Image (cartoon, rainbow, N blue to C red):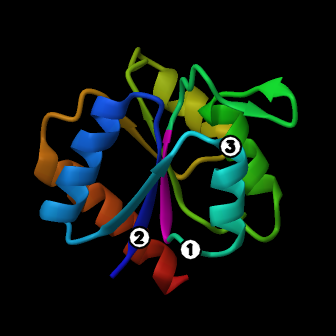
Amino acid sequence: MATVLIVEDDPINLRVFSKILTKRGGLSVKGTEDVDEVMRIARQGEVDIILMDVSLSHSVYQGEAVDGIKITQFLKADPTTANLPIILVTAHAMEGDREHFLEKSGADVYISKPVVDHEKFVNKVLTTISNYQKN
C-alpha cells in the first residue's frame, strides 16, 4: 500500500484529504506541517508521494519562515528526495498560477482547492505514484 504525506496547516483540509485518500484510494496517510518532520520522513523513504499545501502559515525551517514552494525546492534539491513526487495543493488558483507554481517549486503536479471531485483527486494521486514507480 502506498503512503501519502500530507503537508497541510489546516486541520480540516488534512482530515478531508486523509479520509478521501484512505477510503477511496486505499492509501496510507501521514500528516504534518512540521518542516523538520517532513524532511525526515522524506529522507527516510517513509512515503511514496507528498501532497504539499502552498501557503503554510506556521512553517519554519532552520529559523526561517517557509511555504510549500520553498519546502518543495528543498526536497527537489536534495539528491535523497529529488525523485519523490510532490503534488502542490493550493487555493490560489488564478490563471497562470499553475505554471508559475510548478516552475518555481519544481513540483510534479498541481491540484487546486477546494477538491470537489474526489474521484479525480484520488486518480491524480494514484497516477502520479504509478508514473514514478515505473521510472
First-in-chain label (1 vs 2): 2
Was residue 71 drawn as part of the magenta stretch in this picture?
Answer: no
Q: Amino acid at mark 1?
A: Glu
Q: Quadrant of residue 128?
A: bottom left
First-in-chain label (2 vs 3): 2
Q: Residue at x 63, y 52 (%)?
A: 38
Q: Which residue is mark 1?
A: 46
- Check the image and name the residue furthest to the top: 94
Could you tell me if residue 83 is visible in this image?
yes
Is 72 left, or right, of 61 in this rendering? Answer: left
Q: Amino acid at mark 3?
A: Val
Q: In the image, residue 72 lies at what x, y percent?
A: 66, 45
Q: Residue at x 56, y 73 (%)?
A: 46
Q: Quadrant of the N terminus?
A: bottom left
Residue 93 against residue 73 in the figure, above or below: above
Q: Which residue is mark 3?
A: 35
The segment highlighted magenta reads 48-52
Could you tell me if residue 24 is visible in this image?
no
Q: Residues within 10 Å of mark 3 (few under 14, many from 20)?
A: some
Q: In the image, residue 62 lies at what x, y percent?
A: 87, 37
Residue 80 against residue 24 in the figure, above or below: below
Is 84 left, or right, of 94 in this rendering? Answer: right
As measured in the structure, the alpha-carbon distance from the residue carrying label 1 to the one carrying label 2 is 7 Å
Q: Residues within 10 Å of mark 2 (few under 14, many from 20)?
A: some
Q: How many numbered discs sit on the rendered protein?
A: 3
Q: Which residue is mark 2?
A: 3
Is 93 left, or right, of 118 in this rendering? Answer: right
Q: Residue at x 48, y 82 (%)?
A: 133
What element does badge 2 sit on? Answer: strand
What element does badge 1 sit on? Answer: loop
* Label 1 with label 2: CB-CB less than 8 Å: yes
